[in-house]
Amino acid sequence: MKNIRSPIIAILGHVDHGKTTLLDKIRGTAIASSEAGGITQAIGATHIPISTIKKICGRLLEKMKIKLIIPSLLFIDTPGHEAFTTLRKRGGAVADIAVLVIDINEGFRPQTEESINFLKQFRTPFVVAATKIDRITGWHSEERCFLESFPEQTERAQEEMETKLYNLIGQLKLHGFDAERYDRVRDYTRQVAVVPVSGITGEGIPDLLMVLAGISQKFLKDNLEVQPGEGKGTVLEVKEYRGLGVTIDVVIYDGEIRRGDYLIIGGSTPETTVITRVKALLKPNPLSEMRVEKNFISTERVSAAAGVKIAAPGLENVIAGSPLRAVSDKSMIDKAVKEVKEEIEEVEIETDHTGFILKADTLGSLEALIKSLKSMNMPIRKAHVGTITKTDILEAKTMEKPLIFAFGVAPSDEIKKLARDNNVKIFSSDVIYKLIEDYNKWEEEKRKLKEEELLEKTTRPGRVRIMRGCIFRRSRPAIFGVEVIKGTIKPGYRLTKNGKIIGEIKEIQSRGENTGEAHTADKVALSMEDVVIGEHINEGDILEVFLTDRDKTNLEKIRSKLSEDEKELLDEEQ
């Protein structure tokens, strides 16, 4: 029988929808159900052995006729999209399956959208945990299977649960996913399973663990086969640890790592690739012993799938999300260096084309940002892992649109000042949808400003009638009263009579005061320098504002800014 590893499970969802509470409850339930020391807290992950899952799920497994063969479930401890995108490997995410946590009472929120986009981009199968069912009016929630709990609820509580559940299923449908309550799913390869749960009481957790274990071993078995040989992993975090110096927390998804192995960790350039040797492999004590002073125990080898802390020299410049290889033979180092370099080059972008500069904290974050921008047809000139540098600012300055997107890397005060001084705009956030939202808002503001500027310098359509009995001066300048029939007039506008230009408006007065413009139905006095009343114009004449071809072109560009009267006059001119 082939060696099957534990599936790696990530938890995603909107802030305050109960990701951490659910993960804590899963751990707590598992600890309560396990033998002493059975549950181990790996670095950055929690192992729940299959014996514990069988104990928790009990009759549910028998009912669903599921026979479990996977060794355990490995939950990534850091919930949220940051850990999910950090943990990437060639061709996708390190996580084999994800739990998308959605508050059944609230439904989709912005980070739900963000999470579902990540799952699409990385093609990661997922299960929906519809949390906070304990808050449904009249629902009596306790620690047991959802399928046992549901029939015992009042009819009214059941109806409210079903209504909220199918609202959620409807929202998933709008995002292209056919979903159903897990016990009603006909085909797990085509439908997303939704498991109602409570992270507070623990209701539905047996159902969720069973679904995750069942889907993993039935549909992901090929992905879970461990290949003998080199250890493959991704750096989750870089930490300074007293007595050990700089250490890295790593999730191993294939092969194994042994003490003394050569460690190859990818950097953003060939020069920053780290080659070192494993000094120590450290795993935490079982959860039941976490309070003892010695937090870590040393181990000789770690096999996939697992989280482990690695101590080794020269880890100071390693960044989270870096691909990692472990080989026992020195002759295999070059091949491993080539592999990690290709994995980085697969994501990072360097071109001479026009476009934006992207910076992100990890390779996975960068990949997610690139995919999001490309899906919106936004051009990318350069995409690298790391903080914004002076070189980035100076390069952006030369671009048609001097913009930098920074995902998960906050610019320093010095960089912000340099960007301001060079008219470079930086969009920085830990959430991709916020970056894009801020950019769209900025573009909209810029567009409106451009339209306002164009409107200000473009002559607008206008039509006036010279009022009878309102000739105040016949020439040098002629001063006479007009009624604006349609549109707008301003000082500087030229007026025509029967298509012939008769002169330029010098001033406009309303009730004896100079005014900058007059609009439909206004009655004002105009002064015109080169016009003689009785020779060029007369009482009752209709005068039109003269529009150049350029004015007409500009007005069409900003048509939405014009009044209905102005639009009508513009259409007459065409």
Image (cartoon, helix red, strand yellow):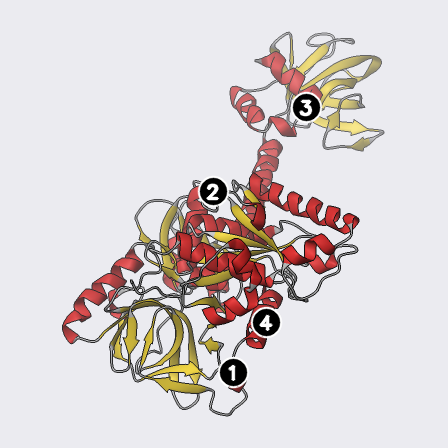
Q: Which residue position holds label 4?
A: 29
Q: Which residue position holds label 1?
A: 36
Amino acid type, residue under disc 2 in the picture:
Arg
* The N terminus sits in image quarter: bottom left
Q: Is residue 405 visible?
A: no
Amino acid type, residue under disc 1 in the picture:
Ala
**Could you tell me how far apart the alpha carbons at marks 4 and 1 are, in whole angstroms?**
13 Å
Please tell me which of labels 2 and 3 falls first in the chain. Answer: 2
Kind of element beneath mark 2:
loop
Residue positioned 62% across, 67% down in the render: 21
Please tell me which of labels 1 and 3 falls first in the chain. Answer: 1
Could you say which is closer to the camera, residue 296 or residue 431? 296
Q: Are marks 1 and 2 in contact (CB under 8 Å)?
A: no
Dot 1 alpha-carbon crowd within 10 angstroms: few under 14, some 14 to 19, many 20 or more: few
Residue 505 got which mark?
A: 3
Report the number of numbered marks. 4
Q: Are marks 2 and 3 in contact (CB under 8 Å)?
A: no
